[in-house]
Image: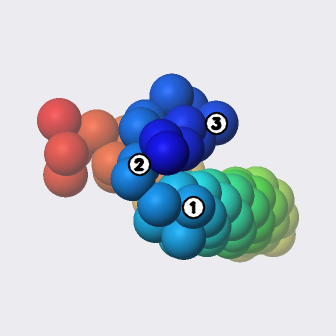
Amino acid sequence: MRYISDDGKVFNTEQECCEYERGIEVEKVKREKLEKERQSRLDTINKRYEELQTLLSEYEKEYGVRQRPYVAPFYEILDMLCG
């Protein structure tokens, strides 16, 4: 008897089919968890970047600094590293 997984792959035993489908589900859960963690970290980075911009503006107002330090946005840094 042949067993077919949800994605159409054919197996000789029910156990092989179930193990394959469990493996697919585990990988899906791992990918989703990794994506949530990645998005959370990116949100934190963006929030801190905004805080840094605010602090730089306040510093400029308080001390009258004409030359403002340049801080590259996260996406520019990624582009330089991976681009």
Q: Nearer the viewer, residue 25 or 34?
A: 25
- Residue at label 3? 6
Q: Nearer the viewer, residue 24 or 29?
A: 24
Note whether residue 54 is visible: yes
Does the CB distance between marks 1 and 2 fall below 8 Å?
yes
Provide residue 7's location: percent of width, then percent of height. Answer: 55, 32
Alpha-carbon distance for marks 3 and 2? 11 Å
Mark whose residue sits in front, 3 or 2: 2
**Who's the residue at 54% across and 70% down the image?**
15
**Who's the residue at 48% across and 42% down the image?**
2
How crowded pointer 1 is (Cα within 10 Å; few <14, some 14-19, many 20+) is rated as some
How crowded pointer 2 is (Cα within 10 Å; few <14, some 14-19, many 20+) is rated as some
Provide residue 57's location: percent of width, then percent of height. Answer: 75, 56
Does the CB distance between marks 3 and 1 fall below 8 Å?
no
Sequence-wise, the earlier of marks 3 and 1 is 3
Sequence-wise, the earlier of marks 3 and 2 is 3
Image vertical order of residue 3 relative to residue 44, above or below? above
Quadrant position of residue 24: bottom right
- Horizontally, residue 8 falls left or right of residue 81, namely right
**Who's the residue at 28% across and 39% down the image?**
79
- Residue at label 1? 14
Q: Amino acid at mark 2?
A: Phe
Q: Quadrant of the C terminus?
A: top left
Q: Which element type, helix, strand or loop, lies under badge 1?
A: helix
- Horizontally, residue 39 falls left or right of residue 38, namely right
